Amino acid sequence: MMLDAKTDRARGYMLLGIIYMHALIAFASTRAPEGVMASFVQIKLLAPHVSVFFLLSGMGARRIARRSVFQITRQSVALVLLAIISHVSGFLIQVAVEGTGGGFGRSLRMLVEPILLGTGYSTFVAWFFLSLAMARFLTYLLYRNMAVFAAVVVGLTGLVLLARQLGLPDNIYEWRTWPPAFLFFLIGTRLPAYLVIPVPLGFAAALGSAVLTWFNRPGVLIDGPCLECDITFVSQPMVGGFGSFPVFLVQELLFFAFLISVSRLARPEWVTRLPYFFGKYSMQILLLNGWFLLVFNAWLLPLLPERDSALLFAGLLGGGALAHRALYVLLKRPIDMMLLLSFRAADLAESCAARLARRDHRIKRRIIK
């Protein structure tokens, strides 16, 4: 029980950070650079840590190798369907809030292309579901059969190269996020069930993570740290965005240590209650955040001041958290139904695949006889 509560709080803290960062990035990207320096510092230091979400997901899948291939496929298909649901719902919200802005043909393309190509979604969170689906699938293959895993990786690499030759989007199916998502998910499955990190050690890890995150940039291991070099660079969990990958890996593991240490604390309850709630309903809150940002960008963002301030930061953090809490209570039934729909559809696909596999097996046995 303590493990579940700790993990839920850790996911909840991550979601609070994601909600805050998404709003802060939207704000900073629409204001003059000289007015958002404090915002940029926070983005540079905090935005890369979305990677830790994959670590936490891996911690909840330590026995993934014991499951059947159909169970794993079912869960991955459900996550892909969640990405599609997030995109389609977000597209409808975008049309309702901003209009089509280009006629029926352009609108249809904006709706269909991301579903077919797996990138360019209408929401900022759909990529996560797709990347988590691939991370789970690859981790399962690695544990069950190394040869099959290697063959799948080679095949996926070939498909990505073929897509680039055909002129398709460079990040088709969000493939640039697959390696870090897979690696962090895999590490999560290897962590002990009752991982305990003392709070003082956790804060020391947070300091180390902040230092590495600030200095991380392409070539830092060759050129050495530089306080003001590539200052606008923000590392991120995707191929080409790490900066220096060894530094990126260490900075994220240190941040994870900090997160786990503070997530052990159950009191004061007025602080931990909301993160626990968000962590318990993490998939629903992620879906909601993608839709909320579309409304936030269209209606609320123009009302914000031109310069950042402590009051603005408090408003984005506290207001965003409370708004998501209230909206989930209000929209709980339709959001839960969307999750249920994705898993029911995945169940149907799994049962169809299982029937086909059994039929093929019977046909082969008849031919042999």
Image (cartoon, rainbow, N blue to C red):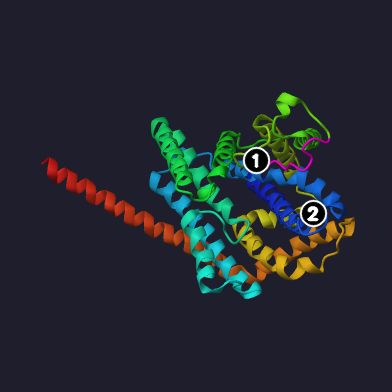
Q: Position of residue 314 (x, y in %)?
A: 84, 58
Could you tell me which residue is drawn at 42 percent across and 31 percent down? 146
The numbered dot on residue 271 is 2
* Quarter that holds the C terminus: top left
Q: Which residues are magenta?
A: 228-236
Asked if residue 265 can be seen in this view, the reply is: no
* Residue at the far right in the pictured view: 310
**Left or right, 235 with reference to 368:** right
Q: Position of residue 342 (x, y in %)?
A: 48, 61
Instruction: Verify CB contact (< 8 Å) between mark 2 and mark 1.
Output: no
Q: Position of residue 20 (x, y in %)?
A: 75, 55
Query: The disc labelled 1 sits on which kind of residue?
Result: Gly
Could you tell me which residue is drawn at 72 percent across and 66 percent down? 296
- Considering the numbered disc 2 on the image, is that residue within a helix, a strand or a loop? helix
Q: Position of residue 106 (x, y in %)?
A: 53, 68
Q: Can residue 327 be found in the magenta stretch?
A: no
Residue position marked by numbered label 1 in the rendering: 241
Asked if residue 276 can be seen in this view, the reply is: yes
User: Which quarter of the figure has residue 313?
Assistant: bottom right
**Structural crowding at the residue carrying mark 2, measured as other residues with C-alpha within 10 Å and reported as few (<14), some (14–19) or many (≥20):** few
The numbered dot on residue 7 is none
- Considering the numbered disc 1 on the image, is that residue within a helix, a strand or a loop? loop
User: Which quarter of the figure has residue 87?
Assistant: bottom right
Q: Which one is earlier in the sequence, the residue at label 2 or at label 1?
A: 1
